[in-house]
Image (tube, rainbow, N blue to C red):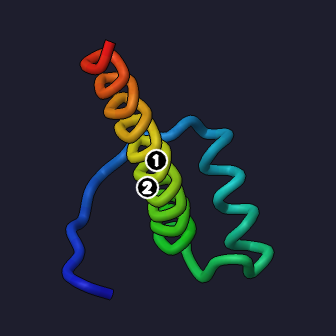
Amino acid sequence: MSESEKITIRLPKSFVDRVDFLVEMDDFSSRSEAIRTAVRDMLYYRVDLVAEKVEKMAEQEQKMAQA
């Protein structure tokens, strides 16, 4: 992994319980790994979503400029 930075977060207990369940079931080796994976997946999803929104906005602005 590239350079990393330690952060502190607060999560609802129900989230922590679910993360712990996944760790206990050997889906992840640690809470940190589970949370890193969740953040990574969310970022990939959000970047794609935002890129689509930006593209649609540019298309609308182009249409408005032609009107």
- The quarter of the picture where residue 28 lies is bottom right
Which dot marks residue 26? none
**Residue at horizontal 46%, vertical 43%?**
52
| Camera-nearest residue between 53 and 63 | 63
| Camera-nearest residue between 6 and 40 | 40
Tell me the residue that label 1 is attached to. 46
**Residue at horizontal 68%, vertical 72%?**
23
Q: Residues within 10 Å of mark 2 (few under 14, many from 20)?
A: few
Residues tagged 2 and 1 counted as in contact (Cβ below 8 A):
yes
**Residue at horizontal 50%, vertical 40%?**
11
| Camera-nearest residue between 43 and 37 | 43
State whether residue 16 is above or below residue 50.
Answer: below
Amino acid type of the residue tagged 2 in the rendering: Leu
User: Which part of the image, by quadrant, shows the N terminus?
Assistant: bottom left
| Camera-nearest residue between 44 and 58 | 58
x then y, percent, for residue 36: 46, 67
Amino acid type of the residue tagged 1 in the rendering: Arg
x then y, percent, for residue 51: 39, 47
x then y, percent, for residue 43: 43, 55
State whether residue 20 is above or below residue 65.
Answer: below
In the image, is 36 to the left or to the right of 28?
Answer: left
State whether residue 14 is above or below residue 40.
Answer: above
State whether residue 34 is above or below residue 18.
Answer: below
In the image, is 24 to the left or to the right of 8?
Answer: right
Q: Secondary structure at mark 1?
A: helix
Which dot marks residue 43? 2
